[in-house]
């Protein structure tokens, strides 16, 4: 069985003016469908950089990236947008909900960019919101929701397009420990009950203990 | 079959997305109301000025052409001028007599009527005061041809011949009343050393392009009496009323020949109503284009306002753009988002600008006592130019937004 994600010798170099910074120095990484992986590592070790490349938000400088057996290292902007829209879902530390849209509209956004009809998009979004436990707040704007609720809405948004993998970059980083635990439990349930593939970046040892597989990064390399 | 189905779906998608984009754009614009209002105001003022200026120019033209509605288009204004001569001293003494004018214009059967007149600028004295005004020597039919209405008394009659009677213009009449506090009708007025009795008062007289003097500030005396008044009272002008569809070129040629016969040193200058209308039409076109351009400049300024506000908006919403890109918006989606906002601004600004422009046109018509008219093109042009401006000036910010890098956009705050 071929891996969902396969990275071979990925490097990422940031050039700022005269100086170059090697954020990733040859990363090899495999992710199977249905896995749940925690990426650990100190701040600045390149975790987000790696995730952004895996999530098609960024290009690697050199190396080979295969997604579902297809080489996606050199795709055009619009192809990347389509993959982001259909194959991956993102959850960010600071939620990144659109402040002017309510919870429901935020969750419908990926479907809107897919060109899905409003009524069916609404139905899907409502189902997902129900599943993540914020069905009662669908007309609330993000600033009317608690951090935990916002993150649940964000998870719903990541899930609504039925992606093949969900990337969560420190999803509990802005939450208190009780809420963190609840949100983590939600992600774990998604993995265990629906076999969702999930990659979580975290600093928290306790959270990493909840994940079946832990990858540690150090100084731009997978340790 | 398959491909066709796909096409239909695609265009349906497009439509769905467009309506959703429009909804979003309105939402976004309404969430920064003051700023949107200011951008809108710029477009509004620009559109309004295009509409008001072009419509106003059109009203002015209509007003200028209106005189022909009352006077008719079958008039010729004929002037007889000295041939410009190097020899300054030789002012030709000879001029047409009244009989000669009649003789010249009696022929042909194409001429219905003729009104010769003389012009003098002798001082006019009334009740010891000097008044500024012209002395016009006219015939009986002058009133009918150039539409002088007598409100009191009577007009000059052909029986008056050399009699010292006069009709005073509206404005002079008011001045006289102010001087003497008694009704000037029947009183005497002094021109040079001669006295004239006021037998009639003319109504306010709308300017026209056929008579070179302003009748409101003139006294009208019998033409023979005027020639007796001064040797400078020459019959140098006459207004000819033609039969309908007369051959103007032929008549002009005939008049030229006939006048040449009597006064070989003079030149005839003929202006027809038709000629005046065409030249006014030409001037009006230039005026319209000119006013339209001035209006367009303010519209461009409005467009720059939209661009400025959209640029600020793009910078402020980088995070939002990043989020949208992260959930799968394509560059074209981001571009449409901002472009539609700019177009919405100019659409709303354009519509309200058209309304305001028409209101201004109405006010212009009201203040100048012009007849208000609805014009089709100024609103259409004003509106479409404003939308075009919105697209043009909205494109650059929208393009900028669409070129943002997802990661950088997400990282900004
Ligand atoms: N756009 C950029 N330009 C320059 N350096 C960057 C840029 N993005 C990240 N870096 C650097 O790359 C390193 C890795 O960053 P990141 O992947 O965000 O680390 P983390 O593991 O904390 O998520 C950091 O040292 C950071 O300063
Ligand atoms: Mg990070």
Image (spheres, rainbow, N blue to C red):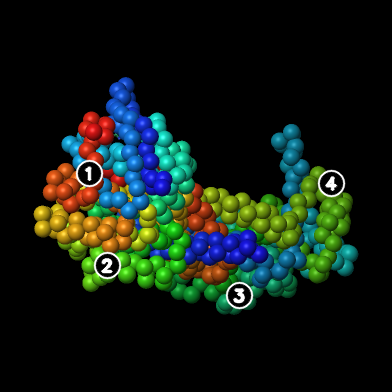
Going from N to C along the chain, the mark reached first, 3 or 4, is 3
Q: Are marks 3 and 4 on the same chain?
A: yes
Give residue B150's mark.
3
Count of numbered labels shown in the rendering: 4
Give the spatial CA distance, label 1 vs label 2: 27 Å
Q: Position of residue B273 (x, y in %)?
A: 72, 61
Q: Which residue is mark 4?
A: B264
Read off the chain for label 4: B
Local crowd at mark 2 within 10 Å, few (<14), some, or many (≥20)?
some
The answer, for residue A187, to whether it is visible in the render is yes
Above-or-below relation of A87 to B24: above
Give the spatial CA distance, label 3 vs label 2: 94 Å
Q: Which residue is mark 1?
A: A214
Q: Are marks 3 and 2 on the same chain?
A: no
Is A108 in front, or is A18?
A: A108
Q: Residue at x 37, y 71 (%)?
A: A123
């Amino acid at each position: 069985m071929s891996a969902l994600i396969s990275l071979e010798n990925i490097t990422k170099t940031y050039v700022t003016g005269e100086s170059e910074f090697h954020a990733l120095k040859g990363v090899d990484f495999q992710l199977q469908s249905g896995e749940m992986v925690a990426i650990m590592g100190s701040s600045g070790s390149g975790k987000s950089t790696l995730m952004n490349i895996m999530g098609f938000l960024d290009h690697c400088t050199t190396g080979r990236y295969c997604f579902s057996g297809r080489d996606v290292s050199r795709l055009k902007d619009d192809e990347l947008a389509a993959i982001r829209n259909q194959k991956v879902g993102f959850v960010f530390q600071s939620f990144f909900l659109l402040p002017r849209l309510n919870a429901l509209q935020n969750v419908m956004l990926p479907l809107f960019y897919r060109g899905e009809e409003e009524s069916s998009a609404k139905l899907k979004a409502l189902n997902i919101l129900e599943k993540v436990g914020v069905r009662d707040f669908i007309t609330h704007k993000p600033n009317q929701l608690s951090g935990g609720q916002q993150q649940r809405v964000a998870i719903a948004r990541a899930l609504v397009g039925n992606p093949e993998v969900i990337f969560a970059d420190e999803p509990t980083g802005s939450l208190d420990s009780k809420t963190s635990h609840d949100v983590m439990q939600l992600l774990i349930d998604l993995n265990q009950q629906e076999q969702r593939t999930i990659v979580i970046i975290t600093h928290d040892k306790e959270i990493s203990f909840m994940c079946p597989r832990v990858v540690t990064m150090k100084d731009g390399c997978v340790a | 079959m398959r491909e066709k189905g796909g096409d239909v779906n695609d265009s349906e998608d497009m439509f769905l997305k467009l309506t959703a984009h429009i909804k979003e754009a309105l939402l976004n614009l309404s969430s920064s109301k003051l700023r949107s209002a200011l951008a809108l105001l710029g477009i509004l003022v620009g559109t309004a000025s295009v509409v008001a200026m072009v419509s106003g120019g059109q009203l002015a033209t209509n007003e200028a052409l209106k005189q022909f509605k009352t006077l008719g288009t079958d008039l010729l204004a004929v002037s007889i001028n000295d041939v410009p001569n190097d020899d300054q001293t030789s002012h030709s003494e000879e001029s047409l007599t009244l009989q000669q004018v009649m003789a010249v214009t009696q022929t042909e059967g194409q001429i219905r009527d003729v009104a010769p007149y003389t012009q003098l600028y002798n001082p006019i004295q009334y009740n010891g005061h000097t008044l500024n005004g012209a002395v016009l020597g006219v015939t009986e039919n002058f009133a009918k041809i150039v539409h002088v209405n007598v409100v009191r008394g009577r007009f000059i009659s052909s029986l008056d011949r050399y009699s010292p009677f006069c009709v005073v213009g509206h404005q002079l009449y008011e001045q006289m009343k102010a001087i003497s506090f008694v009704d000037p009708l029947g009183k005497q007025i002094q021109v040079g050393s001669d006295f004239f009795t006021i037998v009639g008062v003319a109504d306010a007289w709308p300017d026209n392009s056929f008579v070179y003097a302003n009748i409101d500030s003139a006294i009208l005396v019998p033409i023979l009496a005027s020639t007796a008044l001064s040797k400078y009272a020459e019959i140098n002008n006459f207004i000819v009323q033609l039969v309908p569809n007369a051959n103007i070129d032929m008549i002009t040629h005939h008049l030229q020949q006939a006048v040449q016969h009597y006064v070989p040193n003079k030149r005839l200058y003929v202006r027809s109503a038709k000629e005046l209308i065409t030249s006014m039409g030409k001037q009006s076109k230039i005026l319209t284009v000119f006013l339209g351009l001035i209006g367009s400049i303010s519209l461009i300024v409005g467009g720059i306002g939209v661009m400025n506000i959209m640029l600020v908006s793009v910078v402020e919403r980088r995070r939002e753009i990043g989020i949208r890109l992260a959930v799968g918006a394509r560059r074209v989606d981001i571009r449409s988002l901002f472009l539609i906002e700019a177009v919405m601004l100019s659409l709303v600004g354009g519509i309200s600008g058209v309304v305001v422009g028409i209101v201004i046109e109405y006010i212009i018509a009201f203040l100048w006592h012009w007849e208000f008219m609805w014009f089709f093109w100024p609103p259409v042009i004003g509106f479409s130019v404003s939308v075009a401006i919105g697209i043009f000036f909205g494109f650059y910010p929208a393009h900028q937004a669409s070129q943002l890098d997802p990661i950088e956009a997400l990282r900004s705050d």
